[in-house]
Image (tube, coloured by chain):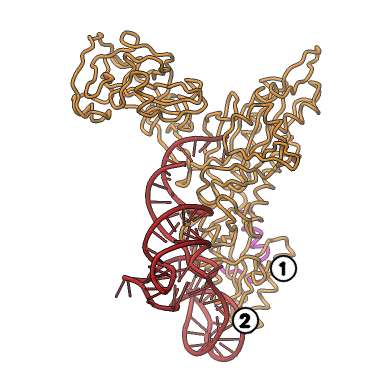
Amino acid sequence: MRMSSLFGRTLREAPGDVELPSHKLLLRGAFVRPLGAGIFSLLPLGYRVVRKAEAIIREEMDAIGGQELLMPVVHPAELWKETGRYQAVGPELTRFQDRGERDMVLAMTHEEVVTDLARSEISSYRQLPQIVYHLQTKWRDEPRARGGLIRVREFTMKDSYSLDRDEAGLDTAYQTHWHAYERIFRRCGVAFHVVGADTGMMGGTASHEFMAPSPAGEDIILLSPSGDYAANREVATFRRDAPPAEDLLPVEEVETPNATTIQALADFLGVPLARTAKAVFFKGDSGRLVFAVVRGDLDVNETKLRKACGEPNLTPATAEEIRAVGAEPGYGSPVGVSGAYVVADESVRDSPNLVAGANRPGYHLKHTNLGRDWQADTVADIASAEAGFPSPTDGAPLTAERAIEVGNIFKLGTRYSAALGATYLDDEGQSHPIVMGSYGIGAGRLVATVAEQRHDDKGILWPVTLAPYHVSLLWLGKADDAETVGAGDRLYAELTAAGVEVLYDDRADRAGVKFADAELIGCPIRLSVSSRTLARGEAELRPRAAEESTFVPLAEVVPTVQRLLAELAAPLSGDPAS
RNA sequence: CGGGGUGUGGCGCAGUCGGUAGCGCGCGGCGUUUGGGACGCUGAGGUCGGAGGUUCGAGUCCUCUCACCCCGACCA
């Protein structure tokens, strides 16, 4: 490709309101352009990168027996009503009507459609297992699109679905995808952790996320130093130390003026946070007030709490709602409360004689005990794990990292097949719902993640597997210097003929402009010729990641570049690093 | 949806007390220059996000509205 005719110009400065490095660089490098909030066009350079990522995904999906198909973006709402998601999912699902006033939705995912296909195509155990996948546009009307390409509303996603006879088959498909995903991300040069995750709105029995560490990430993952534990903070657990046994003391009311926060209370009474009980109030969609109690040194984890109380949505309760069940904001405790669903964390069950609110302003109760002074509807793990907490595996302190979710795998089970009646007959003629899994990778997010993880202050450092072109070729000097331009033209022709993808900077610009653009765009190899190098019959070769150049005789440029490309590709084979 | 911020030429920005819009980069032409974002001359390009209002006069003041960005809520 000649840069003189490339569609899309590089920008010297990014728009002022752009913050993330990947967003800035993808904009400046003429990879993407915004059309609206969370809606982007891919320019030729960006689309080449995305297509390379998609090609890698296709290769690895095909390698595990996946069959590519394509499902529609517009779905009749009927299907979504059948699974209940039409009602259950909020405004991020875009609903509209066609001219016949039939309810339709824009696909935010494709479980319904693939299950509908399965019920019509699959009838016998002989037709299972199957893996089908597609790369399709999805639309999710995010309440807030942010982070450039990391979180968008319209995006292309690879979704695959496994169809199996039973749980054992699903386990196999799940593991198979797990390994394929590891290969995909390694080939794309992404650093990642696989973590246990919440099953969320998808429903299902197990889920893992592929998390790429980055300050731009929206999730927090917790990792044990030995590497044997990794989880999204939403579900992360930690080892709980048994508090020393203690005799139960009688409840005692104490005056605690202005001690409306746990910290203030602990300071006022001179006790550690761990000797207090913290009450947090939520309201569920059912209208129920959910009363969560954790030890004062811990925080409530809303994801865990949602699961523990069976409320898919929780919002903080208002002061009036809290008083309606007999509690007092700032001085709340479950003692004497009625009409609320009380969820106690295990820490509260296990710790005796905690200080808790007296449910009247300015007073707390010392020595409260679960079971004696109050009852919980549920005792569960509803506390958030934090950096430094002991790992559930070996007790070593967990570390916390911010990360971008680049892929996820879900065991759906029979959630969708049962709802839609996607069944098969086994060898005894018995009908069973198909056991399903779903597995996603956002192509654009993957590319943005690579840019986020692999850049310097000058631009992106694309892995050779994703780079829009392998080589940035530039001539330096005067546009009317026939020798230099001719040498550039010849190298462009030779490299292209040898199958090397070349972005040829044939513009009549000064050296600084060409170098800066080459670094910004980030092809793995930069080749330049000038009267200076040509006087010695050489070209200058500089890997994007290197500080130093080497000089290569013109006749050896093609084999040298090919050798270097092979070297750069070697660690990106997809096999585990040794 | 709550909090904060920004809208002035393609991009980055300035615009004072209300007086009829400017700078840098980029873009076109000519000339010089040519290994790290050149220089000179000369051009083109703006209903100041939109609507309404106050005023002799609004980029500037008031009201409403739209868009975008950041934080939070929410979310795979």
Instruction: From the viewer's side, name the closer residue of A317 and A13.
Output: A317
Residue A65: x and y in percent read 74, 35
Q: Which mark is residue A4?
A: none
**On-image quarter of the C terminus of chain A:** top right
Residue A506 appears in view: yes
Q: Amino acid at mark 2?
A: Ala
Please report, as a chain letter, where disc 2 is located. Answer: A
Residue in the image at 52% along x and 68% along y: A516
Q: Which residue is mark 2?
A: A479
Q: Secondary structure at mark 2?
A: loop
Dot 1 falls on a residue whose secondary structure is: helix
The residues tagged by marks 2 and 1 sit, at their Cα atoms, a distance apart of 21 Å
In the picture provided, is A200 more to the left or to the right than A386? Answer: right
- Chain ID for red: B
List x then y, in percent, for residue A35. 59, 56
Please determine if labels 2 and 1 lie on a single subunit: yes
**Residue in the image at 54% along x and 40% along y:** A405
Amino acid type of the residue tagged 1 in the rendering:
Glu
Q: Quadrant of residue A70?
A: top right
Chain depicted in orange: A
Q: Which residues are magenta?
A: A547-567
Disc 1 chain ID: A
Residue situated in front as seen by the camera: A308 or A52: A308
Given this view, does label 2 or label 1 mark the residue nearer the observer? 2
Residue A571 in view of the camera? no
Residue A570 relative to residue A333: left or right:
right
Residue situated in front as seen by the camera: A531 or A287: A287
Determine which residue is flagged by label 1.
A494
Q: Give residue A210's position: percent from left, percent from top.
A: 55, 37
